[in-house]
């Protein structure tokens, strides 16, 4: 996990920008659903579901983008 975090810190500016835009595309609908809560209470449930599934969508994308910054010669003993 520490290697993945270090690799994500090495991402270039366009890669970080792309990842942040994707995060915005996931988060912005939550706020729209919260605004619709006055009319429809189910939108609150959908907003909560999106927030719960947020890490399941964003983290794999982040790790796949930062995978090229992982060291090439990783040993299983280097934890």
Image (cartoon, grey):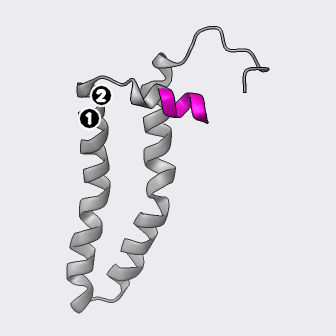
Q: Residue at x 20, y 80 (%)?
A: 35
Question: In this figure, which residue is indicated by the disc labeled 2?
Answer: 15
Q: Residue at x 24, y 70 (%)?
A: 31
Q: Is residue 5 left or right of residue 15?
A: right
Residue 13 appears anywhere in the view: yes
Residue 69, image x and y in percent? 47, 18
Q: Residue at x 21, y 71 (%)?
A: 32
In which quadrant of the rendered image does the C terminus lie? top right
User: CB under 8 Å between callouts 2 and 1?
Assistant: yes
| Rendered image quadrant of residue 33 | bottom left
Q: Which residues are magenta?
A: 1-6
State the separation of the CA atoms marked 2 and 1.
5 Å
Closer to us: 62 or 10: 10
Badge 2, how many Cα within 10 Å: few under 14, some, many 20+? some
Tell me if residue 5 comes above or below residue 39 in the rendering.
Answer: above
Tell me if residue 56 comes above or below residue 5 in the rendering.
Answer: below
Q: Tag 2's secondary structure?
A: helix
Q: Is residue 15 left or right of residue 77?
A: left
Tell me if residue 13 comes above or below residue 32 in the rendering.
Answer: above
Residue 32 got which mark?
none
Badge 1, how many Cα within 10 Å: few under 14, some, many 20+? few
Q: Main secondary structure of the magenta part?
A: helix
Question: In this figure, which residue is indicated by the disc labeled 1?
Answer: 18
| Rendered image quadrant of residue 49 | bottom left
Tell me if residue 44 comes above or below residue 29 in the rendering.
Answer: below
Residue 48, image x and y in percent? 42, 73
Residue 19, image x and y in percent? 31, 38
In which quadrant of the rendered image does the N terminus lie? top right
Q: Tag 1's secondary structure?
A: helix
Residue 39 appears anywhere in the view: no
Q: Residue at x 26, y 86 (%)?
A: 37
């Amino acid at each position: 996990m520490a290697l993945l975090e270090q690799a994500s810190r090495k991402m270039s500016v366009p890669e970080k920008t792309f990842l942040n835009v994707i995060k915005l595309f996931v988060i912005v609908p939550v706020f729209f659903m919260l605004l619709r809560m006055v009319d429809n209470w189910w939108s609150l449930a959908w907003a909560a579901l999106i927030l719960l599934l947020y890490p399941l969508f964003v983290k794999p994308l982040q790790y796949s983008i930062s995978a090229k910054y992982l060291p090439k010669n990783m040993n299983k003993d280097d934890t």
